[in-house]
Every structure is written in structure tokens, then in C-alpha cells.
Amino acid sequence: MPANSQLSKVVCSHYLNLPQGGLCQVTYVWIDGSGEGLRCKTRTLGSEPSSIEDIPEWNFDGSSTNQAQTANSDMILEPVCIFRDPFTLDPNKLVLCEVLNQDRKPADTNHRHTCKKIMEKVKEFHPLFGIEQEYTLMGTNGHPYAWPSNGYPKPQGPYYCAVGADRAYGREIMECHYKACLYAGINIFGANGEVMPSQWEFQVGPCEGVEIGDHLWMARFLLHRVCEDFGVVASLDPKPMSGNWNGAGCHTNFSTEATRAEGGIEHIEKAIEKLRMHHIQHIRISDPHGGQDNKRRLTGLFETSKIHEFTAAVSNRGTSIRIPIQVDQNKCGYLEDRRPAANCDPYAVTGAIAQTCLMEEGEEVDVLCELDINEFE
């Protein structure tokens, strides 16, 4: 058990309950140079901010986050989204930030900048997104939480949405994370136990445009912080355990005003055909390493499609795109992109979906890259 998780929470609560004299703690949160890690640091403001405009820009040492060189290491934190802090409580805040270089151009892993441009161009379609974030609870030794130390639990089958000490491992973490998201103001939709033991899922949305990425990234931050208190690690590895175990995805639901209206299935089918034409490029942005992480997950087994094939069907979880059964029955609604990996950047994924499905060919905003699919054979 990690030493920090054994520190007295009772002693800690005494200090957390001390009055702050009208001052406010603001914790700045940002994505580091890995494209999947989160960093944070805290400062004091003279009063509680009423909006994001009240929070000043800040800077950090980019050479320590793989975002700059030591000789020119300052990076800019530009606040973009504000949440309540469920750890130090009101009036304190959590602030999600974009990372900018000194010339104010977006850092390499700042995909929000481009996503926002795309969402602005397609805003008349009123695109809504919902994201299903799967994660695996791990010990700090890299072994799944509550699994036998020298073996494996019983095979998959009884764990999905299960109850019972022999089937649901780490429910306390899921419940605490859920409440933390509600307190913070994150648009969390639900949570459930997943197919592999010690694996869970929470859903964020529906959110319009770039907001889905803001809320998912902050929900991930809260998950890591909650797990820190329990001495457990939340892994977003797309295939944390080899063998006959499910991987972890970040299924992305997408709809527009047209797909949600009567007869919207026609627009859903057109969107699917556009996604089919750009399958390789979407695999490229399905994880932070150009699809290489996802290659271990998208094998055509364990409720996934094959990475080099594009498929779509109603109610089939072994496809690239699933049309939910109620959508097929109602002839309107949304589609589910099952390809994104658990460690994907939601800004890149949702930006790519919006660009592919809603923008005309040749428009200048581009998040899709050419890629040889043979890399994934």
C-alpha cells in the first residue's frame, strides 16, 4: 500500500476545514507532453472568481513535462473552463487550461485549440457528444486491484454491472468519483462495473461541441485524484491485461440536430459512410500514439472490431460503428463510434468526427492525417 494513502485523513480534514479568510485556492490543470498525462498546481486568488475571465494566465516549467527545453522552458497556461473543487471545497476552484508556447501557438498536445475551431465551424448542426470512459483499477505494483497476487480471478462473465464482494472490486472508488464529478459541475451521466474484474466505466455528456472534451478531461483528473487518496492507480491502458480479458475503450456517441429529428436515420447512415471513407485517419487519432496502443485492443475479439476493417451494424458491439437498437426502431438518434481507446484525447476524437461528418472536403481546419494501414497488420 503506498505511503501517501496511509496518511491520516482525520488529521487532514482538520486543516481542510480551517477558514481561508476570504481567499480562494485555484488549481490549474493541464495535459502534459505525453498527450494523456495530467499535471496540476495551485495558487491563491484574493477572492472567489465569478467566471473564467477572473482567473489569470499562469506559466509552468515545460522542460519537466516533456513540452519544452530547459534553456527556454516557460509554457503558458490559458484558463478555459472552471469547476468547483470537491477536494478542498467551496470557494476553491479547479481550472482546466490550454497549454500555449511562448509565441502563443498551441503546444503539440493541445488538441483543444483545433477542436474548438472545428466546432465553431459546424455549430449550426448542434453536434452533441457523449463519451463512455472505461478504466481499470490497478495497484501501484501494476497488478489489477483485488486480483489474486499469484493468479487470476474467475473468467469474465459475472462482473459486468455486478454486485457482491466476489464480483465488484473497488466500488468505493467509483462512488466517490461520481459524487466528486457531481459536486464539481461535470456533466456525468452514469457509471457501471465493466466486463473485466476491477474495470469500471463512467459516462460524460451529452455535451455540445468542445465542452465534451473539457468535461471528460476534468473527470479524468478527478478520477486520478480520488484513486490517489485510496492508494490505487486508474489505468487508461487500452489493453491492460493480455489474454482473455476485455480491453478499455472510450466509446464516443455522436448526433446532430438532423439525426435527432424524425427520419434522422438517413443522416446517420450518411455519416457512417463518411466515417468509412476516413477509417484509417480515425484510427490514427484513436490513441495518443497514432493507433499503436489501440492495436493491442482492436483485434476483433472481446467486443471490438478489427483495427484494419471498418464495419457498422445495429446492436453489434463487435463493429467500428454501432447503431443502438432504439435508434434503429425510432429511425432517429445517434451513432456510437467504438474505435477510440481509453487513453484517447477526446478533443482529437470529437474534432475528427465533426470534421469528417459535417465539414466539406477541402476546408482548412484539419485534424486527420494520412496513415498506412499496414502499420496495424
Image: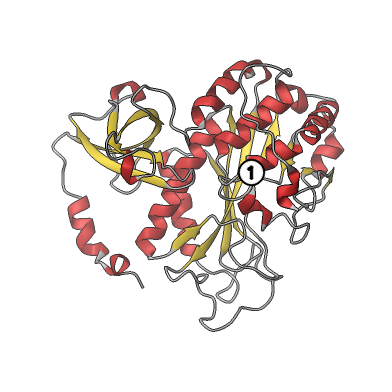
Note whether 292 is above or below 128 in the view shown.
below
Q: Residue 196 at what x, y percent from top left? A: 64, 66
Q: Residue 357 at what x, y percent from top left? A: 73, 26
Query: Which residue lies at the image location 57% right of the left edge and 45% below the top edge?
Result: 344
Q: Quadrant of residue 121?
A: top right
Looking at the rendered image, the quarter that the N terminus falls into is bottom left
Q: Is residue 76 in view?
A: yes
Note whether 207 is above or below 163 in the view shown.
above
The one of 1 and 22 positioned closer to us in this rendering: 1
The one of 147 and 38 positioned closer to us in this rendering: 38
Instruction: Name the residue at the front extreme.
Output: 71
Note whether 256 is above or below 136 in the view shown.
above
Q: Please name the residue that numbered disc 1 is placed on.
A: 286
Q: Amino acid at mark 1?
A: Ser
Q: Quadrant of residue 311?
A: top right
Q: Residue 303 at what x, y percent from top left? A: 75, 57
Q: How many marks?
A: 1
The one of 99 and 318 positioned closer to us in this rendering: 99
Instruction: Name the residue at the left extreme.
Output: 21
Query: Which residue lies at the image location 63% right of the left edge and 61% below the top edge?
Result: 194
Task: Give the SS element for disc 1.
Answer: loop
Q: Residues within 10 Å of mark 1 (few under 14, many from 20)?
A: many
Q: Is residue 249 in view?
A: no
Q: Residue 293 at what x, y percent from top left? A: 61, 53
Color theme of the render? secondary structure
Note whether 188 is above or below 244 in the view shown.
above
Q: In the displayed structure, does residue 92 sit left or right of residue 108?
A: left
Q: In the displayed structure, does residue 258 sit left or right of residue 172?
A: right
Query: Which residue lies at the image location 56% right of the left edge and 57% below the top edge?
Result: 237
Instruction: Name the residue at the bottom extreme.
Output: 150
